[in-house]
Amino acid sequence: MSTVKVNHTWETVFAWSGPVFAFLCLFGLEVLGPQPPSFSASAAETSDFYVQNGTRVLLLVTFCSISMAFLIAWSIQLGVMLWRRPELSRPAIVAAMVSLSSTPVLLAFDLTFFAMAAYRAGDVSPEITQAFSDVAWIGSMLIWPPLTASMVVIGILILQMEPPAFIPRWLGWYSLWCAAAEPFQGLIIFFKDGPFGPRGITTWYLAVPTWGFWIIALSIVMVRVVASSGERPRKLPWHAQTEEDAPA
C-alpha cells in the first residue's frame, strides 16, 4: 500500500472520529446517564441520587471516557488540515489545537470523579459523595476557557482562508457563535439552581450541546473533503495553490 493511500486512510479515520466522539459522548450524557442532580440538595439527597443512579453514572463515565480518545484524534486532523494552508498563522493554529486538545484531557480527570462518586455511594459519608459530585460536575463545565479560545481562533482562521477554502465561511461565524455560548458555564460557581446553575438552560442545555453540534458541523466538511481527495495529495482543496501547482 502506498504512503499516500496509508495517509489518506488515517485522515479518513481521524475525520470520522469527530462524529464518533459526538455520538458516544451525547449518548452517554443524554441517554445512558441521568440528568444532573440538584446542586441545592443536601449531602444525604446527593448521595441517594448516586445510590439510585450508580449504574447509569458509571455507563456515562465509560462511554464519555472512550469518546475522549476520538476527540483527540479529530483535533489533530483538524489541525493538520488547517496547517496546510500557508496563508494561516502557524502560532494561531498551534494555540487553537493545544487549547482544543486540552479539553478531553481535563474531562478525563473529571470523569474519574464521577466514577468515584458513584462507586462507593451509600458506603461512605454522604459529604464525601457530594464533594466528588461537585468536583465532577463543576470541573467538567469549567473547561470553557480553553474550549472557547479554540472556537474563537478556529472561527477567525476559517474567515481568513483565501479561496478556494475547504471550510465554508459560515462555519467560521458559527464557530464564533458557539464560542459566545460557552462562557455561560462559568456562572455555575455563583449559582446552585436556576437558569445559570449547573443544570440550567444557559449552562447544561445550551453550552454543553453546542460543543457537540460544532464538532459535527466541522466533521461533515472534513469527512467530505478527505473522501473527495483520493490519492491526489497535491490537489487537495485544503492546499492553497503554489507556484509549482500553477499552470504554465
Image (spheres, rainbow, N blue to C red):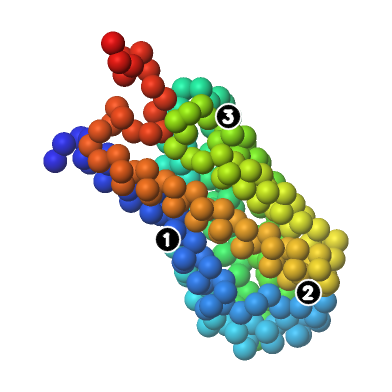
Task: Give the left or right position of residue 54, taking residue 70 as reference.
Answer: right
Which residue lies at the image location 57% right of the left edge and 64% below the top edge? 111
Disc 2 designates what residue? 39
Q: Specify which label sits upstream in the sequence, 2 or 3.
A: 2
Instruction: Name the quadrant containing residue 91.
Output: top right
* Mark 2 closeness class: few <14, some 14–19, many ≥20 residues within 10 Å: many
- Residue closest to the eye, 79 or 246: 246
Which residue lies at the image location 53% right of the left edge and 68% below the top edge? 26
Q: Amino acid at mark 3?
A: Gln
Disc 1 designates what residue? 20
Indicate which label's residue lies in the foreground, 1 or 3. Answer: 3
Disc 3 designates what residue? 160
Q: Amino acid at mark 2?
A: Phe
Outermost residue to the right: 190
Badge 2 marks a residue whose secondary structure is loop
Instruction: Name the quadrant containing residue 190.
Output: bottom right
Q: Is residue 127 above or below residue 157?
A: below
Badge 1 marks a residue whose secondary structure is helix
Image quarter (top left, top right, bottom left or bottom right) of the N terminus: top left
